[in-house]
Amino acid sequence: MEFDTIAAISTPLGEGAIAIVRLSGSNAISIANQIFHSPNGKNLFNQASHTIHYGHLVDSETDEIVEEVMLSLMKGPKTFTREDVVEINCHGGIVSVNRVLKLVLINGARLAEPGEFTKRAFLNGRIDLSQAEAVMDLIRAKTDKAMNVALGQMDGRLSRLIKTLRQALLETIAQVEVNIDYPEYDDVEEMTIPLMIKNGMWVKEEIEKLLVTSSQGKILREGLSTAIIGRPNVGKSSLLNSLIQENKAIVTDIAGTTRDIIEEYVNVRGVPLKLVDTAGIRETEDIVERIGVEKSRQVLKEADLILLVLNNAEKLTIEDRRLFEAIEGMDVIIIINKTDLPTQIELEEIKQLAGEKRIVTTSLLQEEGIDELEEAIASLFFEGTIESSDITYVSNARHISLLHLAKETITDAIEAAQTDVPVDMIQIDVTRTWEILGEIVGDTVEESLLDQLFSQFCLGK
Amino acid sequence: MPNFEAGKFDVIVVGAGHAGVEAALASAKIGAKTLVLTINLDMIAFMPCNPSIGGPAKGIVVREIDALGGAMGKVIDKTHIQMRMLNTAKGPAVRALRAQADKVLYQNEMKKLLEEQENLTIHQAVVEELLVEDEKIIGLVTQVGAIYRADAVVITTGTFLRGEIIIGDLKYSSGPNNQQPSIKLADSIRDLGFDLVRFKTGTPPRVNSKTVDYSKTEIQPGDDVPRAFSFETTEFIMDQLPCWLTYTSGETHQIINDNLHLSPMYSGMIKGTGPRYCPSIEDKIVRFSDKPRHQIFLEPEGRNTREVYVQGLSTSLPEHVQRQLLASIPGLENAEMMRAGYAIEYDAMVPTQLWPTLETKKIKNLYTAGQINGTSGYEEAAGQGLMAGINAGLRVLNKEEIVLSRSDAYIGVLIDDLVTKGTNEPYRLLTSRAEYRLLLRHDNADLRLLEKAYKIGLVSQARYEKFLEKKSRIEVELKRLRSLMIKPNEVTQALIRSVEGSELKDGIRAADLLKRTEMNYDLVAQLAPSEIELTIEEKEQIEIQVKYEGYIEKSLQQVEKLKKMEDKKIPDKIDYDAISGLATEARQKLKLVRPLSIAQATRISGVNPADVSILLIYIEQGKIAKITG
């Protein structure tokens, strides 16, 4: 058993005003201490067990305040796991709680596996067998599900990119290995240090780009940027309200820093949506009219998901057609609203304009069709495989922390290569990077190196 | 033919190839009365394929064998015609020694060692049947009806077990190099219920050197500094013979493509699985058709023979095609073929049927080692032979068996891979198979293993004391360098400038100065002279331990984690069917491999972390007794 320090969000996501990130393990206090700043400069190591402390979490890389928190300090063995435990109480809400989790992961905690706190409690003699058997079921169930989800939810582009990076690393590794294991074979090009540095730099840059996009919310973590568009009076505002009511808005009124667009967050069947320009919608003005064509195009382009609302009780207008043109090639769900009124709109025509895009009919006024809409949103991004919301965020936080690790190890490799460390040592960090990236895509089969070796090179007596 | 009682031994070793000789010597040395049986006494430690020992990973195995009191290193040190250190620029962990052997001298020297070993009887015989009682081996019967009784048996049949040689469309029952194969023993092993697989390997033709035009080839000399595998070797052979390098030509490739239909590999005649890392020339040309040429190394087979091994031309094409192939290679246009290349198919055990001690799970006190376990290579065979011999001997003497872990030795990696993962092709050690290879170095094999060998009597008191002295000198010197400050005075700066380093701004610890790439031990010792004069090996050891301290430390931390998992033992009587949470595939694999520790369980493919967690919970709970019912 490895008793490293583990962390997880231990409150259900999207519910409640407060969320808790729990840390357990021998480094729990030191990790918390690294990121926790109290107004009077408390050192957590000097505090009594089972005490609560007020302060801020600070990202030491950027010196930015991440969260305002209450922190419970509990020293083992009088804790649930019998290890040192720190519980960080932060604001309830996907964004804040995820930030906190990410921060502790970057600072040395490992994301807990499903049921791992309970498992530790058991292994440390805290709970009895019947409880333990329940834990085993949980481990079994959650692991299988987590694996499905991890694969299912993975953004196609992300997984493709990671696989490309891994392949590049694997080729580098294979070439070094072949130079080592078959030194006399001149037909294998020597993997030179400059070449290793070049390949390493490329991988590092790609990882950095990914990390940037991850903090911009492109990898689901902060929600799918979602734009509700449509002519005035088609029901955008009602749609917004019903999405928020149904799903409890988790964070409200976060002002955009550079533009006057208001965002709100909702959680639709595990899909976090960041609804953009909600103020514009509330004013029942069309986004295009309100912020101008260029800027609205920009907003639409940045959106991961577009909800286009049409009015069932009116024929299609020129503006509707313009909107159809503007969203060409994007992920769109078309909503035909106001089915409580007599139908004027021509369905065939819409189907033609929509092409492959999903069409949902609703009467937001009579609360009809909302389930179907939510279903459509969920299935668009998860192809219907997801049931609950928690794993989405956890997995994403996991990806991000792994990417950070991968960045560290490839940086070590590059630095080593630049300081004349022998290739065999550099290889250690290159291989580690390859393994870490493999954990993201769920692929760490070691045989693949040997396969690569023997398919890429002609070796033998 | 009537059977007769021929004697009683503690341990009998069947076969005297590279696995058999190490097994027999080890078993006898630790005090077990040992008999070694071989089909042909003139073939002891015969090298049926390439005349070389060592190379990456394999060379380190030879060092490990030596540190454990084995014979291979000492014998090759006395009988080689050339030695080279490989990978000198690629880092300390992958440096490896390789020797070209004088095949006949090697055999003679090894035979002499066996003959002189106390406690060891050598006899020529064909073993036909294993005698088993209550699932325990009790002896064996030979072709002439001799019954030998034994408490333990080690089987090292190499490629003899139901061996078949194939050249073109000719296929005949044979051991390597037309030796008598071992057929009835194969039946006996199968009848005992063991799973056998069919593997294939091959060897290239040999030519007469007086008919080779070396002017068309490139010379490949040995190193001109003294080298040795054994830590104890003090006399070095400096009179070396070179090897030669040439290449296949376009004509070679044409001949192969034209005659592919005659190749048993492609006609379907060969069904055994061959090794990917050791393909035949026809395989290379088919699979890598875009490569215009392949290297061919010409390696002398000894000092007293003209026979030359044509490395790179392993083939089972018919002999007339082999002749054409040779003639198409620059330097070999007029070469006389002395022996044709051939493929050989043989029976091998599915190695997951073995415990990590190399004892079979099915039959108590029966061990297998070497090629029969699905490996290839003299060194892999010798490493297993040594461990099987040690463990058979220890078993008979009622002592605790020895299992080397993946962090102890390449031999540990080899055996763990075999018994935990099995193999689909003849298994060769590669440095990339060792996750802790930075710790498993050529230079520190004695530091890793000698203590273990001494404890069971494989290493003499004198050698052990010498080793302790070396170890302590290294430790003392390391401690000194780590505490001693070097001042940035003119002498220091001048020395640093002379090797193009950047001058010191402040005082620095001697060890930190040594960490600089441009520095070595002798330079630092000029500034901080030591009172003790160290040997070259000791200096190298210090350099490596200081320069790569950070990486070594990281590896050691990983090993710590592994050790914790290895300490979590799984009771042998565990009933996996009674553990409800396990996935079906994991349950099947666990039942097959029966891992001894949680660490081993995690390495089985198809056993995922959730299964391991569940296993852990059961074991921690101490419920095993109850669920086995």
Image (cartoon, coloured by chain):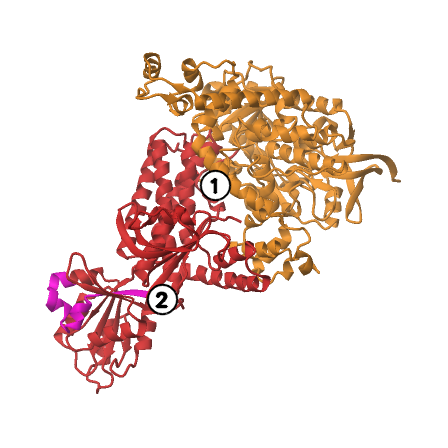
Chain colours: A red, B orange
Amino acid type of disc 1? Phe
**Residue A343 quadrant:** bottom left
Residue B251 appears in view? no
Give the answer, above or below, for where A269 lies relative to A69: below
Q: Nearer the viewer, mark 2 or mark 1?
A: 2
Number of other residues with Cα within 10 Å of mark 2, as a class: few under 14, some 14 to 19, many 20 or more: many
The chain containing the residue under callout 2 comes to A
Q: Position of residue A77 (x, y in %)?
A: 51, 52
Residue shown at 41% from the left, 16% from the top: B523
Range drawn in magenta: A269-296
Disc 2, SS? loop
Q: Which residue lies under the disc numbered 1?
A: A454
**Left or right relative to A423: residue B442:** right
**Left or right relative to A270: residue B571:** right
Instruction: Quadrant for the C terminus of chain B, please.
Output: bottom right
The answer to if B434 sits in the magenta stretch is: no
Q: Which residue lies under the disc numbered 2?
A: A270
Q: Position of residue B72 (x, y in %)?
A: 63, 26
Q: Sequence order check: which comes first, mark 2 or mark 1?
A: 2
Q: Are marks 2 and 1 on the same chain?
A: yes
The chain containing the residue under callout 1 comes to A
**Residue A226 quadrant:** bottom left
Residue shown at 60% from the left, 54% from the top: B620
The answer to if A277 sits in the magenta stretch is: yes
Residue B595 appears in view? yes
**Residue B266 quadrant:** top right
A250 vs B269, nearest the viewer: A250
Q: Position of residue A90 (x, y in %)?
A: 33, 59
Q: Which mark is residue A73?
A: none
B142 vs A30, nearest the viewer: A30
B310 vs B159, nearest the viewer: B159
